[in-house]
Amino acid sequence: MPGGIYEVVAVKIVLTEDLAKNDYSHGHTVPHRYADYHISGVQVTVVDNQVKPIEIAIRVDSEK
């Protein structure tokens, strides 16, 4: 990935095709604002040739 500042969106994907219904939980949903580039307000800076994973934590109760 080229270095620079990137706008971040977050979505939730629940993979359940190999699990019995009782073996999974959907947990918290991702607040809508984080799924939209225009209002997420989340950015990350990547340096050239970065190989270290990027971890971003968001609060699921931030829209209350």
Image (cartoon, rainbow, N blue to C red):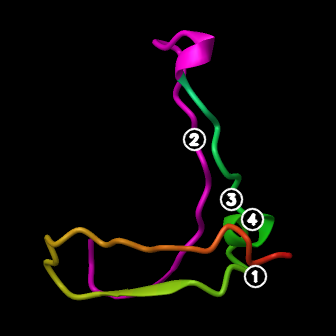
Instruction: Specify which label sits upstream in the sequence, 2 or 1.
Output: 2
Q: Is residue 5 above or below residue 31?
A: below
The amino acid on which the numbered mark 2 sits, given as a three-letter code, is Ile
Instruction: Looking at the picture, tell me which residue is in the foreground, 1 or 27.
Output: 27
Q: Give the residue type that dot 4 points to.
A: Pro
Please indicate whether residue 36 sits to the left or right of residue 21 in the image.
Answer: right
Task: Quickly name the residue at label 2.
Answer: 13
Whole-angstrom CA distance, mark 2 to mark 4, is 13 Å
Say left or right for 33 vs 26.
right
Pointer 2 local density, CA inside 10 Å: few below 14, some 14–19, many at least 20: few
Disc 3: CA contacts within 10 A as few (<14), some (14-19) or many (>=20): some
For label 1, the crowd category at 10 Å Cα-Cα, with few meaning under 14, some 14 to 19 and many 20 or more, is few
Residue wearing tag 4? 31
Of the residues under marks 3 and 1, which one precedes in the sequence? 3
Q: Amino acid at mark 3?
A: Val
Disc 1: which residue: 39
Q: Nearer the viewer, residue 37 or 14?
A: 14
How far is mark 4 from mark 3, CA to CA?
A: 4 Å
From mark 2 to mark 3, how far is it between C-alphas? 10 Å
Reply yes or no: does residue 6 show up in magenta: yes
Q: Residues within 10 Å of mark 4 (few under 14, many from 20)?
A: some
Residue 26's spot in the image, x, y percent? 64, 37
Task: Return the disc, 2 or 3, that comes first in the chain's sequence.
Answer: 2
Marks 2 and 4 close (CB-CB < 8 Å): no
Label 1 vs label 4: CA separation? 11 Å
